[in-house]
Image (cartoon, helix red, strand yellow):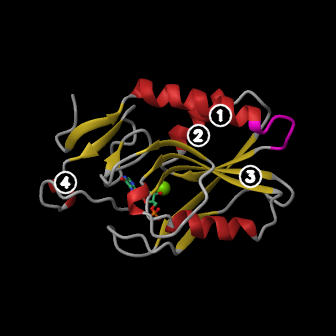
Amino acid sequence: MLPDDMSDILISSDEIQARIAELGAQISADYSGQDLLLIAVLKGAVLFLTDLMRSITIPHSIDFMAISSYGDSTKTTGVVRILKDLDDPIDGRGVLVVEDIVDSGRTMDYLLRLLRVRNPTNLQVCTLLNKPSRREVQVPLDYVGFDIPNKFVYGYGLDLFEIHRNLPFIAAVKPEYIGLPPDEEQGSE
Ligand code: IMP
Ligand code: MG
């Protein structure tokens, strides 16, 4: 039974899993013989992290960070508050940040600044989804699962008002459910 607020499925479960297998193989090759610490941003990136790490064939460790954006619910300011910091220092580590989606780029930009001053040897980004048309701040994305159009999406870890994270696919919401007139596409935090 599909949610009432769903417009259509943008990326199927099979497509997600196939792309993650490719990303895992690529990361395993690129980081072969090197240190690899995956840092996932809670909560949205959790499903992606757990599938991605199972497709990575080289030894690696994981850590988590939870952040909360300031600003209203439809616009990210990029100024984030750390709700949960990493368990361990990252100086001298090979860090790969694992995110669910990069929209304006403000959150990732802030996060990268915050991590860079902790002196990792290497700092890269792997995002499942990318909305290039919404970019306000340029951020380097080293691994991207899918470029998506300017639509608010949920499922596979991403939420709509904290629900639907469990869905195995990525779906677009009906615009009227996030307070937009039909046909006007919009992304938001
Ligand atoms: P940014 O700072 O504008 O790049 O926003 C990034 C954050 O906004 C993501 O980590 C998500 O939490 C949230 N976000 C942006 N677009 C969507 C979406 O389409 N669905 C669900 N969350 C989104
Ligand atoms: Mg997020």
What residue did someone put label 2 on?
Answer: 49
Rendered residue at 37%/49% (across/down):
159
Give the class, few, some or many, for how many residues have Cα within 10 Å of label 1's Cα (few <14, many ≥20): many
What residue did someone put label 1 on?
Answer: 53
Given the image, on which type of amino acid does mark 2 rest?
Leu
The local secondary structure at tag 4 comes to helix
Given the image, on which type of amino acid does mark 1 rest?
Met
Q: Magenta segment range?
A: 30-35
Between discs 3 and 1, the one toward the N terminus: 1
- Foreground residue, 167 or 125? 125
Between discs 4 and 2, the one toward the N terminus: 2
Q: Mark 4 or 2, which is nearer the eye?
A: 4
Between discs 4 and 1, the one toward the N terminus: 1
* Numbered circle sitting on residue 175: 4
Given the image, on which type of amino acid does mark 3 rest?
Val
- Quote the CA–CA distance across marks 3 and 2: 14 Å
- Quote the CA–CA distance across marks 3 and 1: 14 Å
Give the class, few, some or many, for how many residues have Cα within 10 Å of label 2's Cα (few <14, many ≥20): many
- Foreground residue, 163 or 154? 154
Tell me whether circle 1 and circle 2 mark residues in contact (CB < 8 Å).
yes
Given the image, on which type of amino acid does mark 4 rest?
Pro
Rendered residue at 46%/31% (across/down):
16
Rendered residue at 64%/32% (across/down):
24
**Residue 32 lies within the magenta run:** yes
Give the class, few, some or many, for how many residues have Cα within 10 Å of label 4's Cα (few <14, many ≥20): many
In this image, 179 relative to 125: left or right?
left
- Quote the CA–CA distance across marks 4 and 1: 33 Å
In the rendered view of the protein, which quadrant contains the C terminus?
A: bottom left
- Quote the CA–CA distance across marks 4 and 2: 28 Å
